[in-house]
Amino acid sequence: MKKLIISLIYVTLAVSCFTSCENKDETTDPQEIIGTGQVVNYTVSEDGTEVTVEFENGQRSTITFDEPLVGEQGVGIKSITFDEATGMLTFTLTDGTVSKFPIVAEAPVVELKNHSVTPHLLKRHPGFEDLEIYTILSSEDELEQSPDYVYGSMADGAGLLRNDDGTFTLINNIEAHYSVARISFDETFKPLKGEIILNSNATGNTAQCSGTLITPEEHGFGPLYLSGGEWGGDARYVYATDPFRDASEAGTARTLTSMGQWTIENAVPLNKNAFPDKTIVMIGDDSHGDAGGQLVMYVSETVGDLDNGKLYALKVGDGTVTDNDLVAENAGEFDATFVELDERTYDELNAEAISKNIMAFNRVEDIDYRRGSAAANREIYFTATGRTAYNDTRTKYGRIYKLVLDANDPLKGKLSVVLDGDNLEGKGKRLHSPDNILATSNYLYIQEDPNGYADNELKQHDAYLYQYNLNTGVLQVVLESNHRGSTGLDNGYALASDRWGKWELTGMIDVSDELGIDGTFILIQQAHSWYDDGFKNPLGGDINEGSILTVVKGLDR
């Protein structure tokens, strides 16, 4: 007999060979237990029809019988044993009757717990005191299967896969390492191994910021991971990476040149139900020059085609409408169209955008679509993080936009502003450089990367995570970076001299379905003042800031 190391689920069996016994007496303790490393106890229900077996590891299995197991003739249970090799639970009665029952092994259950040596540095705001927060991985952790791997500087966009064997794979941009990492987790969601699958040589030292995981279930093709090249090097393209490629291939990249060269924050394929039989990818251009940042759309008439489609950018009204016009009194919705672009390289695309009156936003950051029906999937939300320049026509503090695409033509839609950080009397008055955004069926979760504006006290806070109710319009602060609290300062994670908003919240994804735990999300802190030279890119680079990966449980979807 082998020691039991698997967990067990309840099984229901009808057993005819035991039903002739009619004694109503219970046997509450076994007369003999064979293999004490396995079955340690059992109890019989009051009516004699159920036996619950307890194993050494604390797991229990209940066997249900059609009729009482023990009867008036004094027949009872002599022993109960379990053989892991065969998966058989064996009942032996005092009259010599032996019966065996297969026990179905259950995959280990996800157990949310702290796996990192680093504490989470987040503060819950009123109304969210019951949130559970766990630190899963940080830059100072050592993983047992890859002790030399460092969870590097400025971890950002991510996507999680549940594998067929019950383990998990997280694909995660490491922005300041200009790379994409793969983190492997066991069945309980414990991180075991980290490795780079797209490195800085392949990206030409171009930062990989937000990212999107493509899956067959959601998009109709994949799995494939898209990341955006934003700053650093000149290879500012959309990158497509196989989540399961061998790490030895990290030095080669697949760039989607058909999507153009921009200052790319993210590239987000729409759900397969939004426009069936098409592939549509929304791209955010984090630029702020004369052409501004663009909202770009790639369209192919073939599902899964990322190379042969056409490229478009957003034009509002007749092309004379500015970003600030969108928030004028009683502005409401604006007609929007996507205009085809001919160019594919950076300078040429910016010149073409100006010539075709494409809408100039102040740094388009992240994009997401609402979950739910096909109509919901055509409801697009995106952020412009803002900038001090061009404020006569564009946002300074940041805005959140809503674009509803026409069901019959993805090149048409209605555009409006949901939250305006420049309106210091409106509900978005505290917005300070909104960056990443996550849309669920009923909520937006907005993450800040504050630019450090000190000209208004409403903006003097550390990075917020907001929850915006898409049905009621209620905006609440959920969490705030708490790196300047006593835990962060006393343990050397932050500096007392840090300005407001020094650290960033980013990379939030909904992992409820993958983990099987509703209301569960990944959220990352970019620790911009936690310095250690051990955090630098091993292939070269000077940025030595840390990263902290957390799981937040208990948020509404």
Image: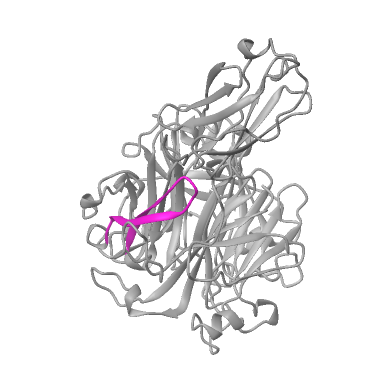
- Residue 537: give x, y in percent of width and height: 29, 70
Dominant secondary structure of the residues highlighted in magenta in the image? strand
Residue at horizontal 32 percent and vertical 76 percent from the top: 534
Q: Nearer the viewer, residue 536 or 39?
A: 39
Q: Nearer the viewer, residue 128 or 298?
A: 128
Q: Give the number of marks.
A: 0
Decide if residue 205 is on the left or right side of residue 380.
left
- Residue 270: give x, y in percent of width and height: 50, 40
Image quarter for residue 70?
Answer: top right
Is residue 249 inside the magenta stretch?
A: no
On the question of residue 520 being in view, the answer is yes
Q: Nearer the viewer, residue 516 or 36?
A: 36
Q: Which quadrant of the rendered structure holds the N terminus?
A: top left
Query: Taking 535 as reference, is 276 above or below it?
Result: above
On the question of residue 361 being in view, the answer is no
- Residue 522: give x, y in percent of width and height: 54, 55
Q: Give, as a single range, the part of the protein colored magenta.
A: 178-199
Residue at horizontal 51 percent and vertical 56 percent from the top: 366
Residue extending farthest to the bottom is 497
Is residue 190 inside the magenta stretch?
A: yes
Q: Nearer the viewer, residue 461 or 187?
A: 187
Decide if residue 250 is on the left or right side of residue 270.
left
Decide if residue 140 is on the left or right side of residue 49.
left
